[in-house]
Amino acid sequence: MYFLITFEQILIMFVLMGIGYAFAKSKAFSKETIKELSRFVMYTVGSCVIINAYNRTATPELVKTFLMTALAGIILFVITIFLASFIFKMPRYKNLEVINDFKFGATFSNCAFMGIPLIEALLGPEGIFFSIPYLALFNIFLWSYGVRLFEDSDDEKIDWKKVMANPVILSAIIGFILFVTGILNKFPEVITKPISYIASMNTPLSMMIVGSNFINITEPIYKDKKSWKLSFFRNLFFPLIYVFILYLLPINNEAKIALLAMSSAPIAGTSVLFSVMFNRSTDFPSRVLCLSTLLSIITLPLIVMIGQSVF
């Protein structure tokens, strides 16, 4: 069952990527159009995805589960960042010109585009709630640690004022406050419906933008050893570590499965979007995204089944 669910989600993603590729190949998408669409998806659509996810009735049990799941998510991210920094400082990776791409790819999964639909299929609509903390944390780490990797700044300090001013981060904070106070659930549909409609644009637009950058791939994917190495870390190495960590944490099994599915998804399509936004080559990010996603047909259901048997 898990194989078929995962395969269907990947197939949908690749169809959308193919549409984006066709648009770029036919010049229907110019480079400037792709760049502006990337900003729209990252800031506007991303903010609506988070606010829309919080739109439910808050109960003490849900709030407690949310906080415990958020703590588990923080642990996963911190351990991943620490291990990735340690591993990729080893001599064998010393002269790797895409070292920051490796750190980014190892840390950030395609949780929003693939993780959430998979969780809904595995656990039902209510299971999506367990993905909200991870999604919020994903955006916080993405717009702090992740952005710094792409900026290639010599200053290792994170500008937290800039991070907290980001629309996506503000949405995560405001959304949580509205969720806990129960205000968001009382908003009229004239407000919540437009937010929901914009949020629904997240997957199709993002995947089309990612696919449009596949025209920049200059080297066959199967010959790229770096893509295979990074895909191994993203698809197998870290997910197996997550199984062990989640086994030790005192949260319910549904939350564990949701966190495992979110954190074990293939490399984030954001790697390509950020490359566009920061005027960097999309060649390697596009190749490794494509390979990691293809390999996840096997690796993701395998990791989820291992998690279910262990938890």
Image (spheres, helix red, strand yellow):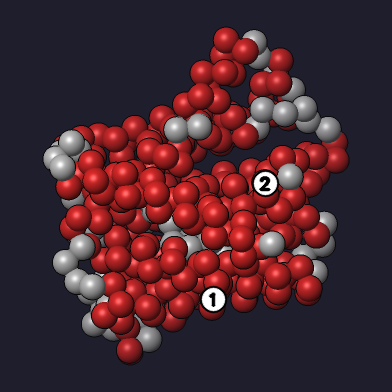
Q: Quadrant of residue 88?
A: bottom left
Q: Which residue lies under the disc numbered 2?
A: 120
Q: Amino acid at mark 2?
A: Glu
Q: Is residue 150 above or below residue 218?
A: above
Q: Quadrant of residue 299?
A: bottom right
Of the pair 186 and 180, the residue shown nearer to us: 186
Q: Which residue lies under the disc numbered 1?
A: 236
Q: Nearer the viewer, mark 1 or mark 2?
A: 2
Decide: few, some or many residues near mark 2? Use Cα within 10 Å; few <14, some 14-19, many ≥20.
some
* Residue 103: percent from left, percent from top: 39, 68
Residue plotted at (57% across, 30% down):
51
Residue plotted at (62% across, 76% down):
240
* Residue 24: percent from left, percent from top: 20, 44
Of the pair 233 and 125, the residue shown nearer to us: 125
Q: Decide which of tag 1 and tag 2 comes sooner along the chain.
A: 2
Quarter the N terminus occupies: bottom right
Residue plotted at (26% across, 80% down):
223
Residue 66 can be seen in this image = no
Q: Is residue 166 above or below residue 25?
A: above
